[in-house]
């Protein structure tokens, strides 16, 4: 399949990169509804219901038909691992944000917020502003689903409809972001969707907007992301997943490789340690270690969380 991306592409929630936000919401909904959930996201199911039926629901299949699960055990396992991974990732970022808020940071910037519901479900201290950055149609869908559900934010929530490859810092400042005050940032489930150059530019811009006491957590592709053997394993798994999706739901699943930019890119931890102002706190932690839900097996892209 040819590349489905272009430099200025944009999307609805149900298409292209937008649908990946729905895929994450399905995983969060499934974790929330599981017997012993690591995270509770009461809005995840609201989003999925508002979007209706689509290929993203394949990520919520808890049990494949037995003959398919038997024929494709790796795919069945991958779908389960995905839910564990998303739960761990969510818990990690929840804890990261609450630590910063408890340390007194009152500006929160969620890059590529997608269907992240932290502005509605975390106990933010008074005076906290959460800026949610994503593409306009993604934010429109999110607001409309939450409005219809009667959801109320637990902070001062500000939507900033932008393309993160364009001049988003200006839009963020115009939305009220104070460059003289500390801030806390996340880039979760974003980097593979940006070209390598846009990733560097993104972090340069974050750096220019932050002062002492600011923090950032990034879900970064690991060294295997672009490794040819790892890519081939991933490609073969994706092929089989797409076949299963066609058999189970009669649907054509997107190929993540059409949405990701498989380019060599700067290691995020190195980038921050060499390029950044020492004010930005750094550490590297494995999501599963912090979130206490062991993720068994591999879930591509291999991820390190850099904080
Ligand atoms: C996999 S989802 C992750 C969403 C959210 N961070 C989460 O973890 O639930 C990827 C998100 O990145 C957003 N995104 C990707 N590239 C973008 C860009 N160039 N500008 C704005 N948003 C972008 C998509 O719209 C989508 O909401």
Image (cartoon, rainbow, N blue to C red):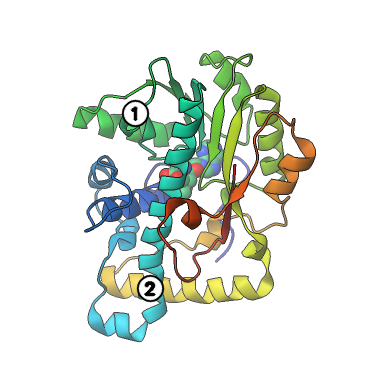
Q: Earlier in the sequence, mark 2 or mark 1?
A: 2
Q: Residues within 10 Å of mark 1 (few under 14, many from 20)?
A: few
Q: Quadrant of residue 145?
A: top left
Q: Position of residue 298 (x, y in %)?
A: 50, 69
Q: Is residue 115 left or right of residue 204?
A: left
Nearest the eye: 196 or 282: 282
Q: Are marks 2 and 1 in contact (CB under 8 Å)?
A: no
Q: Position of residue 19 (x, y in %)?
A: 40, 50
Label at residue 123: 1
- Closer mark to the observer between disc 2 and disc 1: 1
Residue found at x 28% / y 30%:
144
- Above/below status of 137 relative to 211: below
Residue found at x 34% / y 70%:
245
Residue found at x 26% / y 50%:
32
Q: Position of residue 216 (x, y in %)?
A: 59, 36
Residue found at x 49% / y 56%:
289
- Above/below status of 227 relative to 157: below
Question: Whole-Å distance between the Cαs marked 2 and 1?
Answer: 34 Å
Q: Position of residue 4 (x, y in %)?
A: 55, 55
Give the residue at mark 2.
77
């Amino acid at each position: 399949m040819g590349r489905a991306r272009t430099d200025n592409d944009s999307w609805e929630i149900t298409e292209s990169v937008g649908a990946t936000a729905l895929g994450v919401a399905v995983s969060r909904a499934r974790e929330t509804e599981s017997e012993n959930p690591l995270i509770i996201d009461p809005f995840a199911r609201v989003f999925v219901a508002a979007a209706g039926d689509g290929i993203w629901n394949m990520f919520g299949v808890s049990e494949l038909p037995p003959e398919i699960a038997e024929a494709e055990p790796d795919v069945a396992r991958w779908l389960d691992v995905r839910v564990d991974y998303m739960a761990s990732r969510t818990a990690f970022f929840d804890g990261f944000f609450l630590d910063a808020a408890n340390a007194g940071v009152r500006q929160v910037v969620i890059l590529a917020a997608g269907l992240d519901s932290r502005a509605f479900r975390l106990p933010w201290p008074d005076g906290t502003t959460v800026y949610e950055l994503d593409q306009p149609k993604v934010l429109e869908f999110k607001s409309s689903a939450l409005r219809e559900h009667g959801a109320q934010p637990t902070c001062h929530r500000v939507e900033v409809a932008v393309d993160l490859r364009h001049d988003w810092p200006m839009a963020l400042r115009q939305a009220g972001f104070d460059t003289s005050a500390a801030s806390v940032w996340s880039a979760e489930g974003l980097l593979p969707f940006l070209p390598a150059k846009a990733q560097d530019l993104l972090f340069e811009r974050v750096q220019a907007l932050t002062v002492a006491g600011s923090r950032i957590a990034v879900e970064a592709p690991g060294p295997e992301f672009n490794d040819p053997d790892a890519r081939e394993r991933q490609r073969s798994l994706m092929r089989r997943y797409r076949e299963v999706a066609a058999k189970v739901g009669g649907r054509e699943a997107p190929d993540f490789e059409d949405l990701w930019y498989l380019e060599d890119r700067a290691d995020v931890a190195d980038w921050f340690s060499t390029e950044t102002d020492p004010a930005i706190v750094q550490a590297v932690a494995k999501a599963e270690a912090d979130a206490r839900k062991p993720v068994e097996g591999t879930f591509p892209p291999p991820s390190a969380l850099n904080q």
